Image: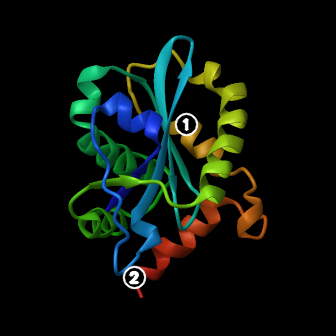
Amino acid sequence: MFIECTKKLADAMKIKTNDITPIKREPFYEWHANLFMFDRRKGVILMNNQTRYCIVLYGLKAEHFKKFDVIVLNAIQETFLAEGFPENQVNTYMGNCGEVIYTKTHDRSILSQISDFHLHISWQIEEHIPNDNLNLVELNKWTGRLFCGTLGYAHPIELLKKEMSMMDA
C-alpha cells in the first residue's frame, strides 16, 4: 500500500518520502494524503486513488505521526465496516494492503480533488467534533456521497462498492 504524502504532511511526520514509481500500480491500494489545520488542530485527508473515497483524521498530535501507518490502516478498516461492507471483504482489502510505503504525490488531479473535498469538509467538520476518535467516520461517510467530477460525476461510495464487489469475483 502506498500513501502518497504532500510535502506539508511529510514535514509534519518528519519523514523523507521515496520518489519511486511502482512497476505495477494498483490505484485501489494507493492513497494521497494531505495535512490541514482546523481550529488549531492538525488533520489529514486521505483520498483513494481509484475511487476518490476520503477518510478524514482529525486531532493528530506528534505521537500519532510516529504510528501513522497503523492509524491509517485502522481508520480504513473502521470506515469500510461502518459503510456496511462485509467483514470478509474488508479483511481481504486489508490483507492486500501489505506494508505501508510513503511516497511523494504524483497526480495533480487527485490533489485538486482533495482541495475540493477539504472545502466541503470545512463546512461540515464542526458537526463532527469534538470527538475522542481520530477517525471521523460519519464525516467520511458524508464525503463518500459527494460528487466527484473527474470520475464521471460519480459518488466515491458507489465506486468503492464496485471495487469491493470485484474482490469477490
Residue 42 position (above or below residue 120): above
Residue in front for this viewpoint, 122 or 76 = 122
**Total of numbered circles in the picture?**
2
Which type of secondary structure does the marked residue at label 1 adopt? helix
Q: Quarter of the image holding residue 16?
A: top left
Q: Earlier in the sequence, mark 2 or mark 1?
A: 1
Q: Quarter of the image holding residue 122?
A: top right
Residue 18 image position (x, y, % from top left) = 30, 55
Give the residue type at disc 1: Glu
Residue in front for this viewpoint, 143 or 64 = 64
Packing grade of label 2 (10 A; few <14, some 14-19, many >=20) is few
Q: Residue at x 73, y 65 (%)?
A: 150
Would residue 42 appear left or right of 149 to someone viewing this image? left
Contact flag, marks 2 and 1 (Cβ < 8 Å): no
Q: Quarter of the image holding residue 126?
A: top right
Which type of secondary structure does the marked residue at label 2 adopt? loop
Q: Residue at x 71, y 34 (%)?
A: 119
Residue 142 position (above or below residue 91): above
Location of mark 1 (residue)? 138
Residue in front for this viewpoint, 9 or 168 = 9
Location of mark 2 (residue)? 168
Q: Quadrant of the N terminus?
A: bottom left
Residue 9 position (above or below residue 122): below
Residue 112 image position (x, y, % from top left) = 67, 49
Q: CA distance from mark 2 to mark 1?
A: 26 Å
Residue 107 image position (x, y, % from top left) = 56, 61
Give the residue type at disc 2: Asp
**Colouring:** rainbow
Residue 168 position (above or below residue 11): below
Packing grade of label 1 (10 A; few <14, some 14-19, many >=20) is some
